[in-house]
Image (spheres, rainbow, N blue to C red):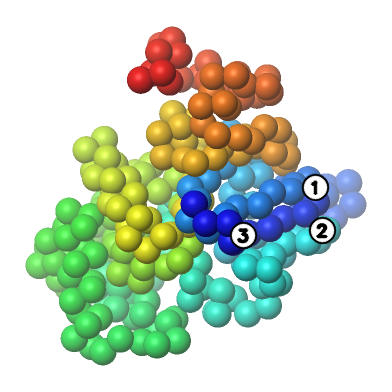
């Protein structure tokens, strides 16, 4: 792992609403994430993990504290998105229903400063589709509303594979695919990470997934990171009651799976 710091947060907070309805979604959170690291942010619904991911993506700015990408403030989201891309849980919200899938996969290259040639774009789109087990001919002329949720999740992943960003923020990226496809996608992400030294941030409720793919795990609860560390430490010697509850929520947990 490299020592270069990709993300650095110091006491960042994010609020929504006003007056009595004001809610703290991220509460004085601090961390560093290194170049090439795989970090999973684990927690239940409403804990603040997706809001924290959107701060990393540049969609939200913290109202308190300091948040830096490669040592600098995020001032231009377009430049930021040249290197930092995302996969969200709802793929339909990330595609325009009035344009074909292939057109949108090709148009995604427009965000890059150095846009490849048309031939190179076509090649990379085909390669990305095959990477998520989709034959290019199978989606030719297809629109988002013609595909299932699982197929659309793979289209979203295909866009990431085609663009090959430096950082991937993946919010429940395998939630709408079956176990076999899920394993293939995770395997490809790991290979892509090794090839490009990609930094990956997984946002998930699944501490089992986090254990198998992560260099470190952040446990979030009620807008705070309540525990952080290597997977073995967090799962075998949990310090937070919330971490213990997440482990207990795994069906038939007996801790032997951790040791294998």
With 155 as the anchor, is 64 left or right in this view? right
Q: Mark 1 and 2 residues: CB-CB less than 8 Å, in contact?
A: yes
Identified at 52% across, 56% down, the residue is: 2
What separation in Å lies between label 1 and label 2 (alpha carbons)?
A: 7 Å
User: Around disc 2, counting alpha carbons within 10 Å, would you say few (fewer than 14), some (14 to 19), or many (20 or more)?
Assistant: some
Q: Is residue 91 above or below residue 229?
A: below
Among the 4 quarters of the image, the one containing residue 78: bottom right
Whether residue 196 can be seen here: yes
Label 3 vs label 1: CA separation? 19 Å
Measure the C-alpha gap from mark 2 to mark 3.
17 Å
Q: Secondary structure at mark 3?
A: strand
Which residue is identified by label 1?
28
Give the secondary structure at mark 2.
Answer: strand
Q: Position of residue 72 (x, y in %)?
A: 69, 72
Q: Which residue is mark 3?
A: 5
Image location of residue 155, percent across then percent down: 29, 60
State the residue position of label 2. 65
- Please state which of residues 150 and 215 is positioned toward the viewer in this rendering: 215
Q: Residue at x 69, y 38 (%)?
A: 225
Q: Quadrant of the C terminus?
A: top left
Determine whether, in the image, residue 179 is placed left or right of residue 54. Answer: left
Question: Sequence-wise, which precedes: disc 1 or disc 2?
Answer: 1
Residue 25 relative to residue 100: left or right: right
Mark 2 vs 3, N-terminal side: 3
- Sequence order check, earlier mark of 3 and 1: 3
């Amino acid at each position: 792992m490299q020592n270069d710091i990709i993300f650095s947060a110091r006491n960042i907070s994010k609020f929504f609403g006003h007056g009595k309805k004001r809610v703290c979604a991220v509460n004085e959170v601090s961390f560093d994430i290194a170049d090439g690291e795989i970090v999973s942010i684990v927690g239940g619904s409403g804990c603040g993990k997706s809001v924290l991911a959107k701060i990393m993506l540049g969609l939200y700015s913290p109202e308190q504290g300091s948040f830096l990408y490669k040592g600098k403030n995020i001032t231009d989201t377009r430049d930021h998105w040249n290197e930092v891309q995302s996969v969200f849980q709802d793929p339909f919200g990330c595609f325009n229903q009035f344009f074909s899938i292939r057109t949108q996969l090709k148009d995604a290259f427009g965000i890059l400063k150095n846009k490849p040639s048309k031939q190179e774009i076509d090649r990379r789109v085909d390669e990305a589709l095959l990477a998520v087990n989709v034959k290019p001919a199978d989606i030719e002329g297809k629109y988002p509303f013609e595909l299932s949720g699982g197929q659309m999740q793979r289209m979203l992943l295909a866009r990431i594979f085609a663009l090959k960003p430096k950082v991937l923020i993946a919010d429940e990226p395998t939630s709408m695919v079956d176990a076999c496809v899920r394993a293939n996608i995770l395997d490809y992400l790991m290979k892509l990470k090794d090839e490009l030294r990609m930094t990956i941030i997984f946002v998930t409720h699944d501490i089992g997934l986090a254990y198998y793919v992560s260099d470190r795990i952040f446990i979030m609860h009620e807008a705070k990171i309540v525990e952080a560390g290597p997977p073995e430490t967090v799962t075998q010697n949990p310090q937070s009651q919330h971490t213990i509850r997440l482990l207990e929520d795994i069906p038939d947990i007996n801790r032997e799976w951790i040791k294998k």
